[in-house]
Amino acid sequence: MSVNFHEFEDGVALAEELADRVSATLSDAISARGTATIAVSGGSTPKAFFKTLSTRDIDWAKVTVTLVDERFVPADNPRSNHLLVCENLLQNKAKAANFLPLYRDAGSAEEAAQIVSADAASLGAPFDVAILGMGTDGHTASFFPRGSNLAEAISATTPRGVITMEAEGAGETRLTFTFASLQDARLLVLHIEGQGKKDVLAAAEADGPETDMPIRAILRRAATPVDIYWAP
Ligand SMILES: O=C1O[C@H](COP(=O)(O)O)[C@@H](O)[C@H](O)[C@H]1O
């Protein structure tokens, strides 16, 4: 397990520092390879970071933004992570970025997952940046405890791509990038806020099965050191 813990006085300071770090990584990627990729999480935590990052001076037209995970709902649904990203990240300078949605108007979530996996493969790998969140149940991306496809999602032998997940507590059927897709991002960040999430992190860092707290798969087995950004 290789983890670097970064603590900030509040969410605003965290958002500034994380936006600086991500901007530098994306700009370096553009210098090195001509384009850059970033996969971001949904939920309530990343809003301030998204707003701050959207103002950063990056060659956004060369950046593709995608989601670590998504609900199987159209982009106009208030619970859509796509909508969250449109309203908070793909604004200001970041309006010029490309966006790869996970939800597709396909016959089923499984069909959508296949279509997105093919599209995502064309982006190249690994992601330059992956920003993960964590739920109070220890889920990350849509790797939910007792999730229908949890074993497949976190297996080191499951290939890169997007699969479906159903779980109690997940609400809608989910689409999620697999462990293989996220664990070797050039910059791999776990962004959490609040004492409650810090306590959950401490529990995840203790012994126990990955299936009880799937964030453990990332903390224990990611190829890239995990940079944890936390504010009270
Ligand atoms: O379901 C989800 O929740 C997690 C954490 O969300 P938060 O509201 O506690 O910040 C998020 O990382 C994931 O992308 C999202 O789909």
Image (tube, helix red, strand yellow):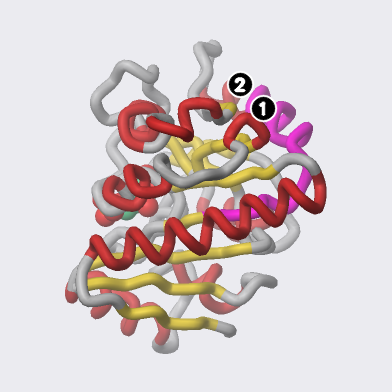
Q: Does 146 sit left or right of 43 as displayed?
A: right
Question: Percent x, y for residue 133?
Answer: 38, 58
What numbered label is drawn on residue 114? Answer: 1
In the image, 76 versus 187, the foreground residue is: 187
| Residue occupying the point 43% across, 35% down | 70
Q: Quadrant of the N terminus?
A: bottom right
Residue lying furthest front: 57
The verdict on residue 129 being magenta is yes
Question: Percent x, y for residue 62?
Answer: 67, 34
Specify start and end residues of the magenta stretch as a single range.
114-130
Q: Quadrant of the C terminus?
A: bottom left
| Residue occupying the point 58% across, 35% down | 60
Is residue 231 visible in the rendered structure shown here?
yes
Label 1: which secondary element: helix
Residue lying furthest right: 33
Q: Within 8 Å of ligand 1, the CB of disc 1?
A: no
Q: Residues within 10 Å of mark 2 (few under 14, many from 20)?
A: some
Q: How many marks?
A: 2
What numbered label is drawn on residue 111? Answer: 2
The verdict on residue 111 being magenta is no
In the image, 15 versus 206, the foreground residue is: 15
Label 2: which secondary element: helix
